[in-house]
Amino acid sequence: MGTAALVKSLRDMNINLTEYVSQGTAHEWLTWRRCLNEFIPHLFKR
């Protein structure tokens, strides 16, 4: 199952999630860096 299919499946089950796509990258350091930058603020939301 690909990421898009997983996201759709979770949303179909009414699971709240945030999707982030790192454009122009593959599974590499820049992807992880961008994703971490997007993820960190979610840790401190109320």
Image: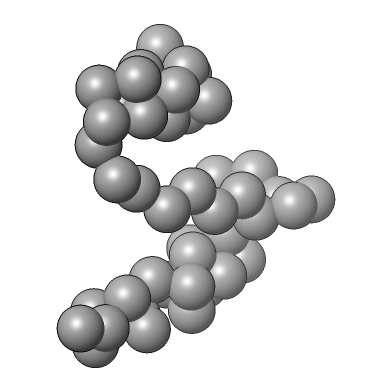
Q: Quadrant of the C terminus?
A: bottom left
Q: Is residue 13 above or below residue 42?
A: above
Instruction: Tell me which residue sits at (25%, 22%) in the image.
Output: 13
Residue found at x 55% / y 45%: 27
Residue at 27% x, 31% y: name it. 14
Residue sitting nearer the eye, 37 or 31:
37
Front residue of 46/24: it is 46
Location of the N terminus by quadrant is top left
Q: Which quadrant of the structure image shows residue 28?
A: bottom right
Q: Which quadrant of the figure has residue 36?
A: bottom left
Which residue reaches farthest right? 24
Coordinates of residue 24 in the picture (x, y in percent)? 79, 50
Q: Residue 31's spot in the image, x, y percent?
A: 57, 59
Residue appearing at x 53%, y 25% in the figure: 4
16 displayed left or right of 46: right
On screen, residue 18 above or below 34: above
Spot occupied by residue 41 in the image (x, y as percentages of width and height): 37, 84
Q: Is residue 28 visible?
A: no
